[in-house]
Image (cartoon, rainbow, N blue to C red):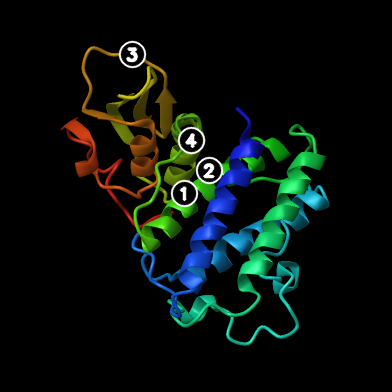
Amino acid sequence: MDHLSHFDTEVQAFHAAAQRTARMGASPLIPTCPGWSMNDLVMHLGGVHRQLIHLIGNRLPEPHDMTDITLLGLPEVSAGWPRPEDAPNTGPTPAGLLDWFAKGAALLGYLFTEAGPGDRVWTWSDDHTVGFWLRMQTIEAAVHRYDAELATGRPSPIHPDLAVDAVAQTFDIMVPARRAWRQAPPGGGERFRFRRDDGPEEWTVVFDGDQVRTGERFDTYDGDVTGTASELMLFLWQRVPAERLRVSGDLGRYFSLAPPV
């Protein structure tokens, strides 16, 4: 899949949604990101981009100091810009904030083009390549574009190809990582199936002790979930409730809507 094309499309759509709210005079709250306004969301995603510009641009083999705000490329005068400790920052969008975001997104996109996907760089995953970050940031851009559009009206669904890739990435990478980060209790062999109703794909996942196994087939499942590729992705990223999909069985503690991550 052409992740770079989707990355460019999603960050541009995110920027357009932020521009719409900037004309409103006050920064609206983001329903799917409790405690954040649009200004906070722009600062968050733009900050992630700037950190990765430093990481990928220098091909760092180890994590750098994420608290070093000089890496964010903020202007010398940034009074009134959203500060995380003051969230939600619901005042007018500060002058220069959206240009700062756009420049960072464009530079990160350039680095993704300039670097080979197999170039080595630090990641929090076992996959220590630039390609990991391109895939991850394409998905994150799509999720936050949905967040931004939700605050301004009716959000567009995720592109089916990207959504299919994101569902697979969630089961293969994000679910095991989230369980490790949260020190989740061991699984008891619970089996779940997720089926796409606008295409042929389906995914299965088993929680067995500390393992998360995918791709196995069974006669019965503890929980069965059906929806469009976009709906499945957004559910797994905790953006839409189970009521938006067709669910049978019990999703238990594995797929409850915890705070967004």
Q: Earlier in the sequence, mark 4 or mark 2?
A: 2
From the image, tell me which residue sits under label 1.
Answer: 143
Q: Residues within 10 Å of mark 4 (few under 14, many from 20)?
A: many
Instruction: Assess whether mark 2 and mark 4 are in contact (beta carbons under 8 angstroms).
Output: yes
Q: In the image, which disc is placed on residue 217?
A: 3
Q: Identify which amino acid the numbered label 4 is placed on.
A: Ala
Earlier residue among tags 2 and 3: 2
Label of residue 139 in the image: 2
Q: Which of the two labelled residues, at mark 3 and mark 1, occupies the earlier sequence position? A: 1
Q: CA distance from mark 1 to mark 2?
A: 6 Å
Report the Cα–Cα distance between label 3 and label 4: 21 Å
Rendered view: 152 above or below 254: below
Image x and y of residue 155, in percent: 38, 51
Q: Is residue 50 visible?
A: no
Q: Amino acid at mark 2?
A: Ile
Occupied quadrant, residue 167: top left
Q: Nearer the viewer, residue 142 or 208?
A: 142
Residue type at the position of mark 1? Val
Q: Residue 123: which quarter of the image?
A: top right
Q: On the picture, is 80 further left or further right than 49? A: left
Is residue 106 depicted above or below 188 in this figure? below
Where is residue 118 shown, x and y percent of the image? 76, 32
Between the residue at mark 2 and the residue at mark 3, the CA separation in whole angstroms equals: 27 Å
Name the residue tied to disc 4. 166
